[in-house]
Image: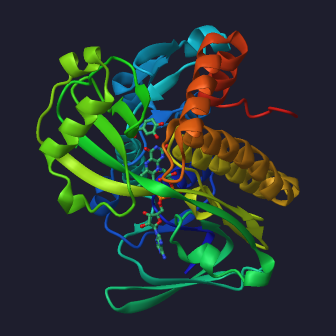
Amino acid sequence: QRVQVAIIGAGPSGLLLGQLLHKAGIEALILERQTGDYVLGRIRAGILEQVTIDLVDEAGVGARMHREGLVHDGFDMLFDGQRHRVDLAGLTGGQHVMVYGQTELTRDLMEARAGAGLPTVYEARDVAVHDFDTTHPRVTYTKDGVAHEIHCDFIAGCDGFHGVCRASVPRSAITEYEKVYPFGWLGLLSDTPPVHHELIYIATPRGFSLCSQRSTTRSRYYLQVPLTDKIEEWSDEAFWQELRLRLDEEGRDRLVTGPSIEKSIAPLRSFVTEPLRFGRMFLAGDAGHIVPPTGAKGLNLAATDVKYLSSALIEHYAERSDAGIDHYSQRCLRRIWRAERFSWWFTQLMHRFPDEGPIEAKLKSAELDYLMNSANGLKTIAENYVGLPLDFGA
Ligand code: FAD
Ligand code: DHB
């Protein structure tokens, strides 16, 4: 079998890339290790930046997002018992973010792909990438016990942090930068109205907490927990009790609790791979980089990688120019490091580290107090949170 682009992974990166290529008349096959239902069951990101919204529109799958997504013009920061609002729109000349779950976006992309009759192989086992350092890359896999081979022009590694593409690159050709944080996020999803109409980022002596949402009737809450905690040890009641202790009085009064529909612990990591292109194979999204979730950059960064990659491939096929391909790594990495910096900074500011003493707690309070009372401090948070423009620094 032959295809122009073989995409590994049907997460948001792979599906969005497939859709953008299809719009440009480039044929792609997606290979996904899991079932479609499994992919849809992974509760992850919830906040879309404007660049991501624009890209979803460009891919032609934005209708439901605009109908059901919630536009947020700001969020609250809660520390030392006081709330402060970060007025995103006021601080950035009218920009905002949108609450729309990764699962919803993935579903819209899957449906568009199926509707257009585009090929996705779910439950593809033993996916392997070959000869990407030549002009004739190949991908092999097995499906229902039958071996398959795909010949292609390019391989797009959209297969996440644990994928096969990055792992197939010779160690001498790749540099990986990594930091693992000494705590995790315990997340709970429930069909209860959110405690507040906007998000609340909370720093307390008991640790960080985040009150997020997926709709006006569905809440997503997170608690910073030690990495040694096991999900079985956290009953719903224990979760709600701990959240109450990290909220302020208004929050405790308004909090509506209910049974969880999903509960999981995620580790926090900063990770970047350099470069992101290896001959005719590209890494995009979590395959190439991970940010800690504080600030909601993960999915949005994946979307900009895909934007750069789709334009590079379109340039190659339509204009016979490889300029975009040659610049892919560099263009992505510049934006990635900026988002890595913000996510790392926001994470260290908002969390309690196991080795920190009273002075670090005081210094973080002072930093938050400064930021929330300085027009410049507020502005720097706001412009990073809504996402720096694509041509930033250009
Ligand atoms: P993925 O979504 O990981 O998709 C990769 C796909 O490739 C998967 O479907 C996988 O099954 C498939 N795959 C892997 N290996 C193979 C193989 N060998 N062969 C074939 N297919 C393969 N971001 C936020 O902004 N906010 C959050 O709250 C947030 N929470 C998160 C919680 C968790 C637990 C995780 C892991 C991530 C979270 N993120 C969050 C990050 C965000 O979800 C990711 O940045 C986003 O999913 C990246 O999309 P992707 O398509 O690049 O990777
Ligand atoms: C969500 C996650 C984040 O990391 C964040 O900063 C905001 C929202 C969420 O899952 O809803």
The x, y position of residue 13, in whole percent, is: 54, 54
- In which quadrant of this rendering is ligand 2 seen? top left
Q: Give the vertical position of 110 relative to 63 (above or below).
A: below
The reply to whether residue 91 is in sight is: yes
Q: Quadrant of residue 266?
A: bottom left
The colour scheme used to paint the residues is rainbow
Q: Give the vertical position of 358 relative to 136 (above or below).
A: above
In the image, what residue occupies the spot 76% across and 74% down?
Answer: 174
Q: Is residue 70 left or right of residue 334?
A: left
Q: Quadrant of the N terminus?
A: bottom right
Q: Give the vertical position of 371 relative to 297 (above or below).
A: above
Q: Farthest residue in the front direction?
A: 358
Q: Quadrant of residue 190?
A: top left
The x, y position of residue 18, in whole percent, is: 54, 55
Q: Is residue 170 left or right of residue 298?
A: right
Q: Farthest residue in the top direction?
A: 90
Q: Quadrant of residue 122?
A: bottom left
In the image, what residue occupies the spot 37% across and 39% down?
Answer: 206
Q: Quadrant of the C terminus?
A: top right
Decide which of 292, 349 is in the foreground and name it. Answer: 349
